[in-house]
Image: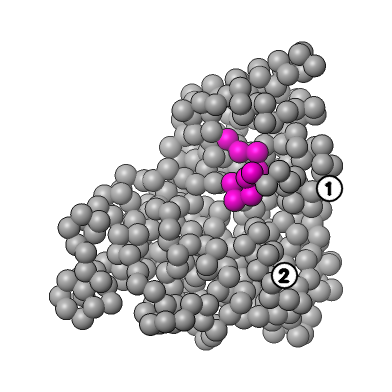
Amino acid sequence: MIYLDYQATTPLAPEALDAMLPWLRDQHANPHSAHGPGRAAKAAIEVARTQVAALLPASGTVSFTGGATEALNWAIKGVGGPIVTIATEHAAVLDTAEAAGDAVVLPVGHDGLVDLDAARSAIRPGVKLVAAMLVNNEIGVIQPIAELAELAQQAGALLLCDAVQGYGRVTIPEGCDLIALSAHKIHGPKGIGALWIRDGVALAPLLHGGGQEAAGRSGTLSPALCAGFGAAAALMASQRDQDTAHVERLWSVAHSTLGADWTVNGSLEHRYRGNLNIRRDGLDVARLMSDLRDIAFSAGSACASGSGRPSHVLEAIGLSTGQARNSFRIGFGRYTTEEELVNALKRIDAAARAQRIAA
């Protein structure tokens, strides 16, 4: 199997697994207990918290959550509306903002970048929260978070950055007030995320209970998941330059392998290079995936797979329903080899050509 679906989830780093195993196998104490084993578990969590925080602004606190969806829900519901967000945001933001009420959704251009003129008009005094994704999960476009943060600050609003796809890969601007993260997008375990909260920002609780975690999040933490998250974050920090160079090389290889019949969706300049969302006129993506079952790639966001609906992100950048259905996403990174990427792309291209001949 050639795995090319890094935006859906990343392979677990061996170092993250090694960090988790002792807490899964031998050490079962509740980290919120006052006895020795409990204090040891708590200490492991604090090490992980420091590792995760190392890639974030210094003036805030990392609060572990059950995942990025919980973190985003907590931030949005904890601040409340009016809210300004962007049409290409993840459903965890768009649906939560809609549920919170009084939300303005900003349009994007064909390149996937937010319309800053529309943002200036919408982000006015009275707005409480601006929510924006650093790196888009479907098309890899990098939004101008620093500019949006400045607009939010001028209006007296907070800036929530969904950094799930960008954490450890793209610099997070200092102007953010809330930052949502997910471990399994950085070669860590599933089932844990975090919300970074700037000092002085107060949130209403999403989960009521013991208030065990930083900023009052309730629920017993898993030392194993925290340790895995921390180890993965430490690797993102130590291998950032290597990972970036590797992804840039793979991006170049992908472009030289694919022909002129393929179109990249979204900005070529303002994007994370490990995300390649492409389309080809007349392509039957479902048939392509069926023909190439030993290559793992995505017809859209894994979170929305099976819905049968065209991608809201591709529609937001102006693609027709047909063009959206002719599109798919390839994601690669640290553990992708050049050989397997070239092999996969050549087979994808050949299968697409075969469809055209058969038609």
Majority SS type along the magenta span: loop
Task: Please state the horizontal and vertical placement of residue 187, each as a whole percent of the image.
Answer: 42, 49
Query: Amino acid type of disc 1?
Result: Gly
Q: Residues within 10 Å of mark 2 (few under 14, many from 20)?
A: some
Q: Nearer the viewer, mark 1 or mark 2?
A: 2
Q: Indicate the quadrant containing the C terminus: top left, top right, bottom left or bottom right.
A: top right
Q: With respect to residue 23, does 200 lie above or below?
A: below
Q: Earlier in the sequence, mark 1 or mark 2?
A: 2
Q: Which residue is mark 2?
A: 98
Residue 102: x, y in percent?
A: 76, 77
Residue at left offset 21%, top offset 64%:
28
Q: Residue furthest front?
A: 307
Q: Is residue 213 left or right of residue 111?
A: left
User: Can residue 163 be seen in this snapshot?
Assistant: yes
Q: Residue at x 77, y 40 (%)?
A: 324
Residue 249, percent across and down? 54, 34
Query: What residue sits right under mark 1 in the picture?
Result: 318
